[in-house]
Image (cartoon, rainbow, N blue to C red):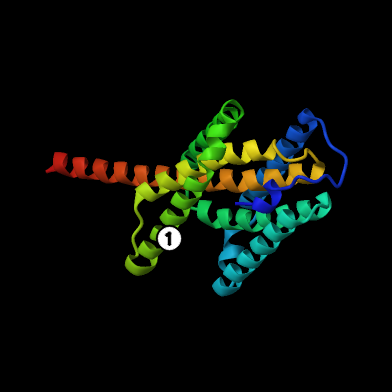
Amino acid sequence: MNNHVFKRTSVSSSLLSDTLYNFIIGLTLCWGFLINWLLVTFIDTALIRDLDLVLFIASYLISVVIGTFLYELSKNPLISFLGYNLVVVPIGVLFNLCLSGAEPNLVINAIRVTGIVTLAMMCLGILFPKFFISIERALAGVLCLVIVIELMELILFGIHHEIIDWVVAIAFCGYIGIDWVRANQIPKTLDNAIDSAAALYMDIINIFARLLSILHDGKSDNDSIDSTDSGDFND
């Protein structure tokens, strides 16, 4: 994932200090999450629901693909930042739809767990860089296989298993460690900091989405059990 970014070895601009480089990665991530929060909080969901579905999906895919292409291949930080925003904005709009009916407590819990997991995996990446690099190919294979299975089940049978959310979430936890290690192995330039943040953003967003799905499924199961127990008691 994002191999164009993490295979860079040449330097086309001045190098940053380790502290400044990591600070810019963090700042870029915070910018993306801020944009997502603003889109979820202040955009009326009804406006998005009124959009033509085909147009919405096409616009989402085009924006994400172009954005990814820009930040992966460009060595100009401004163009990379533009590409990053072309990814962040449609994801924020999508989350506006997905979170419109979600319970606030579930969202807060998903955010908290995602934050803890992200910091933990970054620390583990610092402590065990060789381990994370060694599992990269295996993790990519597992992730691709699971996503293919998930799509087949949804398309052919219309079902979704919670275990898939767990596997994907765990895989992206590994990718946070991998991408953090790789981000600190390439030349520490401004453009590379932005591009590395974009890669980490995708990892973190995927974990958040899967955790939210897991928490929602768990809440639904508990509600079903409570309803059953209540019915038995009344009988």
Q: Is residue 167 left or right of residue 57?
A: left
For the point 63% across and 49% down, the residue is: 41
Residue 2 horizontal/vertical position (percent): 64, 52
Which quarter of the image is occupied by the C terminus?
Answer: top left
Q: Residue at the far right: name it.
A: 14
Give x and y (percent) for residue 160: 36, 56
Residue farthest toward the left in the current orientation of the protein: 235
Q: Nearer the viewer, residue 131 or 76?
A: 131
Decide: is 37 above or below 98. above
Q: Position of residue 96 (x, y in %)?
A: 58, 54
- In the picture, measured across the screen, residue 85 lies left or right of residue 174, that is right
Q: Which residue is drawn at the image coordinates 54% and 36% (left, top)? A: 132
Q: What SS does tag 1 mark?
A: helix
Q: Which residue is mark 1?
A: 148
Which amino acid type corresponds to the residue marked 1 in the rendered image?
Val
Image coordinates of residue 103 in percent, x first then y, are 46, 44
Residue 50 falls in image quadrant:
bottom right
Crowd band around label 1 with a 10 angstrom C-alpha radius: few (<14), some (14–19), many (20+) = few
Give the residue drawn at x 47%, y 55%: 144
